Amino acid sequence: MQRYRVRDADIVSEIIDDEAIIMDLSSGRYFSAEGVGAVIWDGMVCGFDVTQIKQRILQSYALDAAGLDADFEDFADALLANKLVEAVHDSAVASVDRGMPLPAHRRKYDRPVLSRYDDMQDLTLLDPIHDVEETGWPNRKTDF
């Protein structure tokens, strides 16, 4: 049973209006996935196996199962390449019995796409907490 899990605690995300917004705090990059991509991401965060994620997509979007396999793999490969998730081939991933609410009516299917943004990377990596003494803010660190 193949599953994916979020790589580590530096990867945070939120789903807002059928869009997954994913942030890699260690690199400062952020990502976006809408529609089917958000359903896939949500399933991975929840610990669902690949079959469960695909079933959720088939319930929510108008497409045949054969067309989903390649699109799913391409999207998963993009998540892996950006080090957002890792593949797990056992049931060690704890799953939750909740996920994003699925639409009441089947929607038009669009291939899942992971969009990557580097434009705010420098700003995102600014973290004044790491530049202070142990006594805390506003005592700036003098010995690096």
Image (cartoon, helix red, strand yellow):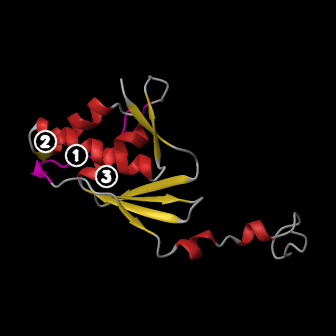
How far apart marks 3 and 2 lie (CA) works out to: 18 Å
Task: State the residue position of label 1.
Answer: 71
Q: Which residues are magenta?
A: 95-109
Compared with 67, 84 (above or below) is below
How far apart marks 1 and 3 lie (CA) works out to: 13 Å
Pick whichever, 78 or 139, lies toward us.
78
Q: Please tell me which residue is depicted at 15% across the width and 47% down the height of the picture.
A: 104
- The x, y position of residue 95, in whole percent, is 43, 31
* Residue 67, numbered circle: 2
Question: If you read the primary sequence from the N terminus, does the residue marked by circle 3 or circle 2 appear first?
Answer: 3
Question: If you read the primary sequence from the N terminus, does the residue marked by circle 1 or circle 3 appear first?
Answer: 3
- In the rendered structure, which amino acid carries the disc numbered 1? Asp
Q: Main secondary structure of the magenta part?
A: loop
Identify the secondary structure beneath mark 3. helix
- Closer to the eye: label 1 or 3: 1
Q: Quadrant of the C terminus?
A: bottom right
